[in-house]
Image (cartoon, grey):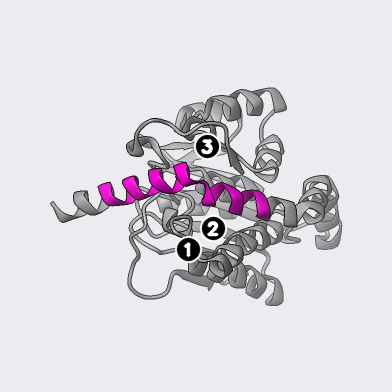
Amino acid sequence: MFPLRLLGTARRILPTARSLSSKGPLTDLSVDNDGIATLTMQRLPVNSLNLELLQELSKALDEVGKNKSKGLIIASASPTVFSAGLDITEMYNPEEQRMTAFWSTLQDFWLKLFGSPYPTAAAISGHAPAGGCLISMSCEYRVMVNGKFGIGLNETALGIVAPRWFMDTMCNVIPQRQAELALTTGRMFSVDEALKVGLIDETASDKADAIAKCKKFMAKFENIPPAARSLTKQKIRMDPIIRLEKTREADLNEFKTFCKLPQVQKALGMYIQMLKQKAAK
């Protein structure tokens, strides 16, 4: 991740990321009677991805694998936001050790989710920009609640180049030509647009309906030998996984270099100050 340019106003830097946190556990992991696990992000109001949330998400994936659940659904406790993406406070005046842990944990989480042996689906109950879109695309199936919501990798519009593994994830979901257009323009898709291009697989009336449709997707594998299904998925997804594994250190260094740029720090500081002023009103 590195900048091509920084846009002129702080309002346009990472506008979908907020750094407010909720009380209590950041995630909830439950398993139904059919063995389907639901992992709910509950760092309200917008599930911005900070180090602690990413650590809990990563540990939850370990738990799902250990308990041999039949599948995993990722959902949000918010009725309007799936996840707003990376928490900007992790990039503002960063402490070296925490910054390294933050990006390394994001890499770990993606490798586990994208390469998971069990079926995965996202119940998207609201906006899913940037990192929120990455999480949903890393799953095998996506159901998005109807409404005036957006989903996409909008980094380019913010003067940022998305990491290669973000791009790989999008190319795994929609045709490369459509991914190229979306990535180079920083496009945010409406629900209907996302369905048309294949960024999501179904729409739903509400969160419960989205989860029910995700479970219906899981049911397709009831008569498929799990080992064969798992190996097929992992072979199809092997190239992006190997690419990140071979370039993890370089990817981390690019992220840290980007964060330390004076113009980036200035813009992030202005945006955070704007959020504080807005919250004080």
- Would you say residue 270 sits in the magenta stretch? yes
Which residue position holds label 1?
Answer: 40
Going from the N terminus, do you reach mark 2 or mark 1 first? 1
Which residue position holds label 3?
Answer: 155
Kind of residue at badge 2: Ile
Q: Which span is picked out in magenta?
A: 253-274
Q: Tags 2 and 3 in contact by the CB under 8 Å rule?
A: no
Q: In the image, residue 260 lies at what x, y percent?
A: 53, 51
Kind of residue at badge 1: Thr
Question: Residue at image x 71%, y 40%?
Answer: 168
Residue 219 can be seen, yes or no: no
- Nearest the eye: 102 or 123: 102
As drawn, 28 above or below 278? below
Which residue position holds label 2?
Answer: 74
- Nearest the eye: 156 or 151: 156
Left or right, residue 106 beside residue 176: left
- Nearest the eye: 100 or 63: 100
- Helix, strand or loop at disc 3? helix
Going from the N terminus, do you reach mark 2 or mark 3 first? 2
Left or right, residue 58 beside residue 250: left
Q: Tags 1 and 3 in contact by the CB under 8 Å rule?
A: no
Q: Tags 2 and 1 in contact by the CB under 8 Å rule?
A: yes
Q: Nearer the viewer, mark 2 or mark 3?
A: 3
Question: Residue at image x 60%, y 41%?
Answer: 2
